[in-house]
Amino acid sequence: MPHQPTAPAPAGDLKNLEGLRRVVEDQIGPRAKGTIYQNIDGAFEVLAVIRDPQQARELLKRRCAQWAVIVRDVLRADGEPFPVGSVWTDSDHLVLREAGADGGAK
């Protein structure tokens, strides 16, 4: 069977994908690899940001997950890495932004 070229995505689909990308980025917030942030639950170092929905769904065991952040609680000596899917809110605060996370300095 010959390969049939796929038609380009309609402009509306591209607009929807861009909108979803922005929503995901807003939900992740300033969390990037190496960033440390704090909230009521503890202080966490970001070890990885997963933007692949399938991988995020497997990590979080949620059918609708679009992303996940793998963190380690830096306030616990025995802090083991674990995935989170909580959105960035006003109760989260940056403690350290790793150089290169936003192109700038710490």
Image: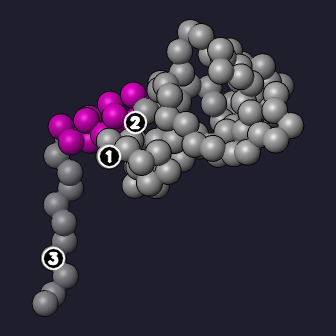
The mark total stands at 3
Q: Residue furthest right?
A: 77
Q: Residue furthest front?
A: 78
Q: Which circle's residue, 3 or 1, is located before the other in the chain?
A: 3
Q: Distance between the residues labelled 2 and 3?
A: 28 Å
16 falls in the magenta region = yes
Is 91 situated above or below 13?
A: above
Who is closer to the viewer here, 43 or 51?
Answer: 43
Residue type at numbered disc 1? Arg
Who is closer to the viewer here, 40 or 55?
Answer: 40
* Percent coordinates x, y for residue 2 in the rendering: 15, 87
Q: Which circle's residue, 2 or 1, is located before the other in the chain?
A: 2
* Percent coordinates x, y for residue 19 in the rendering: 32, 31
Tell me the tag on residue 21: 2
Corner quadrant of residue 88: top right
Q: Which residue is drawn at 21% across and 56% down?
A: 8
Residue type at numbered disc 2? Arg
Going by the image, does 73 lie left or right of 57?
A: right
Q: Name the residue under label 3.
A: 4
